[in-house]
Amino acid sequence: VKTFGQLAGKDGTKLLEYVELVDGVYLNDIMLQINPKSDIQRTNKKVNNDSTLRIQNLSILIRQIKSYYQVSGRCHLWCFATLCST
């Protein structure tokens, strides 16, 4: 299992770590590791306090999460239906 260290690097402050989360880059990277087959577009890595880019990144994250659970949910339903019919 791969774990994550500090968000903002070795010399990062709590504020920089918070900004990494708010920008959506870090969370999208985690979601990409959870679901590497995702066909969702890549995030904007250089947000630089641009609220439009931040919103785009968070929208991508929401689509990735929805996609993951829709596919995962269909698999669980299919497995459940298969087990019940035997």
Image: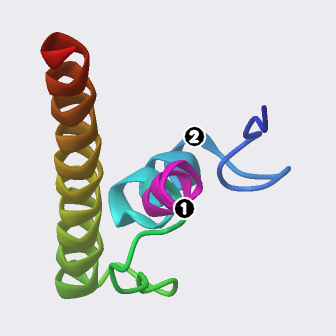
Q: Is residue 74 left or right of residue 16?
A: left
Looking at the rendered image, the quarter that the N terminus falls into is top right
Which of 32/51 is in front?
32
Under tag 1, what secondary structure? helix
Quarter location, residue 16: bottom right
Q: Amino acid at mark 1?
A: Asp
**Depicted 43 relative to depicted 72: above or below:** below
The three-letter code of the residue at mark 2 reads Lys
Instruction: Give the residue at x 50% y 87%.
Output: 46
Kindly give the residue lying farthest to the front in the view shown: 86
Mark 2 residue element = helix
x 27%, y 28%: residue? 79
Using a 10 Å C-alpha cutoff, classify the residue at mark 1 as few (fewer than 14 neighbours), some (14 to 19) or many (20 or more): some
Q: Is residue 50 above or below residue 1?
A: below
Q: How many neighbours does mark 2 have within 10 angstroms: few (below 14), some (14-19), or many (20 or more)?
A: few
Mark nearer the viewer, 2 or 1: 1
Residue 63 appears at what percent x and percent y? Answer: 19, 64
Q: Residue at x 41, y 70 (%)?
A: 38
Magenta region, residue range: 28-35
Residue 14: numbered disc: 2
Of residue 4 and residue 49, the one placed in the foreground of this image is 4
Separation of disc 2 and disc 1 at Cα?
19 Å
User: Could you tell me which quadrant the C terminus lies in?
Assistant: top left
